[in-house]
Image (cartoon, rainbow, N blue to C red):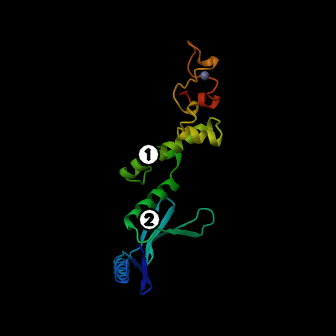
């Protein structure tokens, strides 16, 4: 099946023939005119972002923490504005979250806190493992409960092969369980 591409007022349309391709371009022009051109300024703690419209779709721009310069990205072509605002808020909540906030960012809605719950949990577990002496990789596997490394996160893990796993031994003595994992208390 051939696809015909035409340009109407600088906007490309596609279709099985010229008429359909022109109709497609006209629909796109109508969508561009219907976009919400009000900018949305979002501030969470000391971070901000601006969501704004361009004829190519909605964009977001925010200052880079390192350089202080603005960087941004588009949202694909003419994607929904609400989704970009929502994703931007989640991004700012993550950027401004600290372990002291525990499982609730004070500036997040209940719904946002629920959506970020597994991310908060991962961060807190990662930090705990790191402080107990785990390497980056170990902390990552512990926080993410990697099925390949159950000895790093599974409660009462026992390999069943070592002397520590012999009957009558206290759990947590398995040689595969690293010492930092025992510091965390639930090995
Ligand atoms: Zn064992």
Q: In this view, does 127 lie to the left or right of 21?
A: right
Ligand 1: which quarter?
top right
User: Residue sitting at 50 percent across and 51 percent down?
Assistant: 97
Pinpoint residue 122: horizontal percent, then vertical percent.
51, 43
Q: In this view, does 145 lie above or below 172?
A: below
Q: Is residue 73 left or right of residue 19?
A: right
User: Residue sitting at 36 percent across and 50 percent down?
Assistant: 110
Pinpoint residue 87: horizontal percent, then vertical percent.
44, 60
Lower sequence index among marks 1 and 2? 2
Q: Is residue 79 above or below residue 134?
A: below
Whether ligand 1 has any atom under 8 Å from the Cβ at mark 2 is answered as: no
Under circle 2, the secondary element is strand
Q: In this view, does 15 lie to the left or right of 119?
A: left
Identify which residue, 31 or 54, lies in the foreground.
31
Q: Is residue 176 above or below residue 13?
A: above
| Image quadrant occupied by the N terminus | bottom left
Identify which residue, 67 or 73, lies in the foreground.
73
| Residue matched to label 2 | 42
Pinpoint residue 178: horizontal percent, then vertical percent.
64, 29
Q: Nearer the viewer's eye, disc 1 or disc 2?
A: 1
* Other-residue count near label 2 (Cα within 10 Å), few / some / many at <14 / 14–19 / ≥20: some
Whether ligand 1 has any atom under 8 Å from the Cβ at mark 1 is answered as: no
Q: Quadrant of residue 63?
A: bottom right
Question: How many numbered dots are placed on residues in this image?
Answer: 2
Q: In this view, does 10 lie above or below 47?
A: below
| Image quadrant occupied by the C terminus | top right
Q: In this view, does 135 lie to the left or right of 84?
A: right
Identify which residue, 79 or 41, lies in the foreground.
79
| Residue matched to label 1 | 117
User: Residue sitting at 60 percent across and 31 percent down?
Assistant: 181
């Amino acid at each position: 099946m051939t696809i015909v591409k035409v340009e109407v007022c600088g906007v490309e349309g596609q279709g099985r023939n010229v008429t359909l391709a022109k109709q497609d371009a006209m629909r796109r022009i109508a969508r561009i005119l219907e976009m919400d051109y009000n900018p949305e300024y979002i501030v969470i703690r000391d971070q901000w972002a601006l969501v704004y419209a361009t004829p190519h779709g909605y964009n977001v721009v925010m200052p880079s923490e390192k350089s202080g310069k603005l960087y941004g990205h588009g949202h694909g072509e003419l994607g929904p504005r609400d989704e970009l605002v929502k994703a931007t808020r989640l991004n700012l909540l993550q950027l401004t979250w600290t372990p002291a906030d525990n499982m609730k960012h004070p500036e997040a809605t209940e719904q946002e806190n629920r959506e970020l719950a597994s991310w908060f949990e991962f961060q807190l577990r990662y930090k705990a493992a790191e402080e107990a002496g785990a390497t980056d990789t170990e902390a990552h596997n512990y926080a993410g409960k990697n099925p390949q490394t159950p000895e790093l996160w599974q409660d009462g893990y026992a390999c069943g092969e070592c002397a520590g796993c012999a009957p009558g031994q206290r759990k947590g003595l398995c040689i595969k369980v690293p010492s930092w994992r025992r510091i965390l208390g639930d090995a």
